Amino acid sequence: MLVLFKIDRDYNSAINILKLVYKAKEVIGMTEDESVVYIGGKPFINYVNAVLIQLSKNGVNNVVVKSRGKFISKAVDVVEVVRQRFLQGKVDIHSIKTNSEEFMNKENKNTRVSTIDIDLITV
């Protein structure tokens, strides 16, 4: 997105527009690494939109959907809705990677959580 302002315009208005762009990316689940969508507690359709937006960009032929813990089922649902409802026959699953991460929880105990990375590729 290109936003042009005259020199005499208010500098703060340009900053506010950039903040809105970054906030919009955050709301739909996009990251600075534009080929990754992290699934979390936001509404389901936000993640579907993020995947669709990324796949519609020129030069992007794959998107990785990442999730962990209780959000793994939401990640699978997002991928299946994109594949079977929106981009039927145009997107396929390239690979699925599962793993687990260990971290300290609030009670200072080591806890393991499952993770999944689903790599979508355009056909």
Image (cartoon, grey):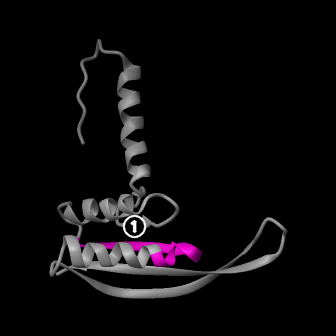
Residue drawn at x 16%, y 81% is 123
In the rendered image, the quadrant that contains the N terminus is top left
Is residue 71 on the magenta stretch?
Answer: yes
Residue drawn at x 79%, y 65% is 106
Residue drawn at x 30%, y 86% is 94
Is residue 51 on the magenta stretch?
Answer: no
Asked whether 84 or 122 is in front, the reply is 84
Residue 69 in the image: x percent, y percent?
Answer: 59, 76
Asked whether 68 or 95 is in front, the reply is 68
The residue that mark 1 highlights is 36
Residue 53 in the image: x percent, y percent?
Answer: 26, 59
Identify the element where label 1 is drawn.
Answer: strand
Which residues make up the magenta segment?
Answer: 61-73
Residue 117 in the image: x percent, y percent?
Answer: 45, 79
Q: Quadrant of residue 60?
A: bottom left
Q: Tell me if 111 is positioned left or right of 108 in this view.
A: left
